[in-house]
Amino acid sequence: MTTDTLVGSVAAGRHSDGLDRRQVHAIAACYFVASFAALGLPPYLTAILPALGDPTGSWAGVLYIVPTVFSALGAPLWGRLADRFGRKRLLLRAQLGLTVSFLLAGAAQSLPAFTVALVLQGFLGGTFAATNGYLAAALEGPRLSKALTLMQGSARASLVAAPILVGALTPWISPHRQYLVMAVLPLAAAALLALLPEPARPAPRAEEADATGSVPAAGPLRLLYAFEFVFVFSTVISFPYLIALVEERLPGVCGTVSGVLFALPHLCYLVFAARVHTAFLDRPRAGIALGFGFVALGLAGHAVTHSLLTFVLVRLLLGAGLTLGLVCLSVLAAEAARGRAPGRMFGTLEFVSKGGAVAAGAVAALANSTLGASAPVLIGTAAALAAALGAAALARFPRSRWSH
């Protein structure tokens, strides 16, 4: 997309409701590039920390979740501020916050300074909530859920590509100093986002508005939060020790194969998310139940598989569950956003999501150290299976029976 095209698109957007397709794709591109350092550099913490005074990298596990913790703590505050002062302004703040924190991380000369930079990365960042709040202020219904699905695709693509790029650059630039290079990405994203309009929610249709002319809040908000937490917990719990599990079950396997196995579920999302969105747009509750079921099957398979072929199969099963779950959560989030302040809702949703990730990391570490590499996936299996049964039971009731 050229700058002239984008500016023309923006100008049109200021005089019409919502965002057009090119603007949504521009936002997705900004989310992708801003996620690069945040997702690509943490796996290299064990290589970064020795030069900062931690020779064995013993603080890597703690520092890995520091941005996540502080992102969760800051998300509700930034969401409320976005509703009050403007979603575009707070989205720009998030991108510039990442820029500052990456510069500080790349320039840090000690472990405390680097830790402060990671704290600021989490607290000042929050691009997930800021981006989704921006979209929800301009779009609704299927257009919003499709845009949220696209944002998840941006995150998955970054999760796959970023560690590969960081590794490719390592012979020339150390992972620590790559923070300085990566700071250019959220800065460029902020420059592009500055061209976009301040979003304005489309006027409600006459049949949807109440007597005051507004749309009453709708959508299963509490269940959305519960499903989000359990889904993130049950999927993320398998991530930290997957490579160790692969090496235990497949002795002598090369790092490339381990990396491909790690990436397979995310690649499934990239390939099939759009089709799943079309298929489950009108039945997200059935889709989330099916997604939890596939996650449970995939994780259970991790605990018993001992060959490369079966590892590929169980990773694909997990990918099917990941795709179904994330897409249907996006549809449920679009339903819940109708009639609600989007900044506050998506800020709380990020708090819940990050809480699930932190809980998964803590439980995985404890289970792995006491029971072995298979324990985290078995715990994830139990959580996903319980959620699948609960979601399947709730899916039998009409939407009006679901709690708001």
Image: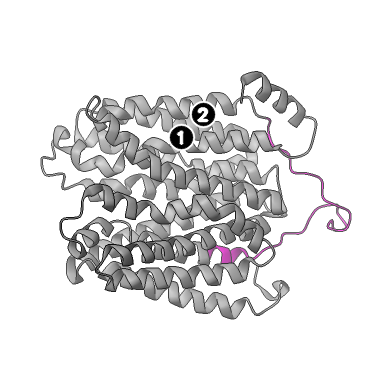
Where is residue 3? Give x, y as percent: 62, 20
Going 24% across and 41% down the picture, which residue do you hit?
45
* Disc ID at residue 189: 2
Q: Is residue 131 left or right of residue 254?
A: right
The disc label shown at residue 281, or none: none
The residue that label 1 is drawn on is 34
Mark 1 nearby-residue class (10 Å; few <14, some 14–19, many ≥20): many
Q: Is residue 3 magenta?
A: no
- In space, the residues marked 1 and 2 are separated at their CA atoms by 7 Å
Residue 13, image x, y percentages: 74, 31
Residue extending furthest toward the top: 4
Q: Nearer the viewer, residue 167 or 9?
A: 167
Count of numbered circles on the image: 2
Which residue shows up at 58% across the image and 66% down it? 222
Q: Are marks 1 and 2 in contact (CB under 8 Å)?
A: yes
Tell me the residue at 50%/62% (across/down).
228
Residue at image point 25% right, 50% down: 62
Three-letter amino acid code of the residue under disc 2: Ala
Q: Which residues are magenta?
A: 197-225
At mark 2, the secondary structure is helix
**Looking at the image, what colour scheme do you see?**
one colour
Q: If the image is split into quadrants, where does the C terminus sit?
A: bottom right
Mark 1, secondary structure of its residue = helix
Task: Check the image and report above or below for 383 versus 365.
Answer: below
Q: Evaluate whether residue 85 shows in this view.
A: no
Q: Give the crowd class for mark 2: few <14, some 14-19, many >=20 residues within 10 Å.
A: many
Q: Quadrant of residue 299?
A: bottom left
**Mark 1 belongs to which amino acid?**
Ala
Q: Nearer the viewer, residue 74 or 286?
A: 286
